[in-house]
Structures are given as structure tokens and as C-alpha cells.
Amino acid sequence: MTTEKNNPIKKVNIICAKGAIEDVYATLVMGNGAVMEGIETNLFFTFFGLDAIVKTRMDKLHTGVIGNPALRLPGGLRMPTWMGVIPGMEAFTSWMMKSQMAQLDIPPVSEFLDLITAGGGNIYACKLAMDMFKFKPEDLSEHVSGVLTIGEFYEKAGGEGSQIIFT
Amino acid sequence: MAQKTYAGIAVDVNEEGYFITPSQWTREIATEIAKEESLTLTDQHFDIIEWLRKRHNAGEVLSIRSINHSAVLDVKTFYQLFPGAPLKKATKIAGIPKPVSCI
């Protein structure tokens, strides 16, 4: 028996603190993947990550085009930073990202939350960030099971074989 | 390549127990694999198993999302029918390879 088999991951608790497409999808893919493996899953959205669970914003996320040295133009050339200030460049890049993901059958954020909760995954919002950004519980997706303080989050994250992941 | 005997028939499986030759599968075999997973198969189980086999034979990559488009059942019911890791369990019982999708 290998160490991996002796110590399987039984629970993952993933924190998403940023609201760009790639940050949110890292959380959603890892969260959904855990649910699919039968791993207990808690997703905790805080700060700008809250956009992923706010109804009016969740399917309109963007990718940042300034300060992203890995960003490439179609064809593979690096995108110069100055191009990021061209009006519409961020919207275009975000549209490109979304269409590439759609081709791979990656669902929109709202549908992803639906898949995760259908499998028993839990979605939480951070109380402090909610207060800071003046969001109310009714602004959140129906898939959110609660607004938690950080203390409550740690309580839920406890247990043998449990991992906390910050994306 | 290993062999396993289900319902009196020897089938080719990989080290994880997934079928190498999906054409060796029968409903009786499915019932026996399900027993190993502590599951008793109902008509609803067989409906989605048949659908998974059809999609696999059509060369499609199976994902949890695709279940919602199956018109057989929704993802929530799928998780209830095959508790734990439904896509892995269902494909094993359906006698098709383990899905390689991340979604």
C-alpha cells in the first residue's frame, strides 16, 4: 500500500479571493473535481472572489490584461502591456477566454455552481467581504448555503484528511 | 492485462478494474460489478448506463456536465444513484474506460 492510498484526501476547503476568470475557474474546476471524486467540498468566496457568487456578476467575469506577462495574442506573440489600455481589449480578451473554455465544454459560472451543489458541494460567502462590498444575502446565487465568519469557516474545514487550498 | 470473471464470463480489465473491451459487457455483468460497489441496479441505473455506453461508442468524452444533457436524468439524481464518485463508478459498471475529463 502506498502513502497516497493510506492517506486519501477526504475533504477540501478552497478559498477564492480573486474575481478574474482564471482565479474563479481554478476554484470551480478543483471544487467540482473534488465533488466528482466523492471528496467532501467547501468553497469559500471572499474579497473580489465574491463576484463569482453574486447573481448579477457571476457570468460576466473578466481576465485582466494589464500586468499579466503570460498573456498572448492570437498566434502566440506576447501581448505588450501598452496594448492593455486600448479600449475594449479587456472585454475582447475575456470573450476569447470564455469562448475557448466553451469549446472544451467548460460551463459558465452559474452552471458550474449548479453542478457542484448537485453533487453535495457547499458554497459559502465571507461575511467580512460581504460587509465591505455592501452585498446582501439576496444578492448571492441560490447555491450559496451561507455567509460565514472566518472562525466558522475553520470549524467547517476541520477533520482528518482535510485540506485548505488558497487559489 | 488482467482478467476478471463476472457472471461466468471472463472479461479483460485494466489494473483499476475498467473494461478494455466494452463489447464483452452484458447487463448480468453490470449487476455483478455493481455488487462489488455495494449497489443494486434499478431501471434508472440501466437507463443512464446504456446512455453512457452509447455516448462512449459515439467517441464522446464523458463529463459530469454531459449527464444534464442526457435527457435520462439530471446530475443530482446521478449523484444519488451512484454515491461517492458517480462518473467513475457508473463507467466501471457500464464496462467502458474511465473518463479522462476534468469536468
Image (tube, coloured by chain):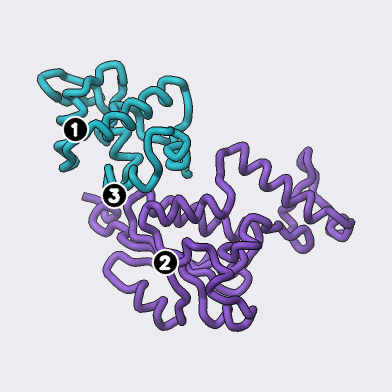
Letter of the chain that mark 2 sits on in the rendering: A
Residue A88 point in image, percent of width and height: 85, 54
Q: Residue shown at 31%/21% (left/top)?
A: B22
Residue B84: image tag: 3
**Hey, what amino acid is under mark 1?**
Ile
Q: Please indicate whether residue A47 sits to the left or right of residue B16 in the image.
A: right
Q: Residues within 10 Å of mark 3 (few under 14, many from 20)?
A: some
Q: Residue shown at 33%/27% (left/top)?
A: B96
* Residue B41, above or below A107: above
Q: Answer yes or no: are tags 3 and 2 on the same subunit.
A: no
Letter of the chain that mark 1 sits on in the rendering: B
Q: Secondary structure at mark 2?
A: strand
Q: Please indicate whether residue B31 sits to the left or right of residue B61 in the image.
A: left
Q: Confirm or deny contact between disc 1 and disc 3 (CB under 8 A).
A: no
Q: Secondary structure at mark 3?
A: loop
Can residue A54 be seen here? The reply is: yes
Letter of the chain that mark 3 sits on in the rendering: B
Where does label 2 land, which residue? A13
Chain B colour is cyan
Residue B33: image tag: 1
Can residue B15 be seen here? The reply is: no
Chain A colour is purple
* Residue B33, above or below A78: above
Residue A62: image tag: none
Q: Image quarter for residue B87?
A: top left
Mark 1 vs mark 3: which is more N-terminal?
Answer: 1
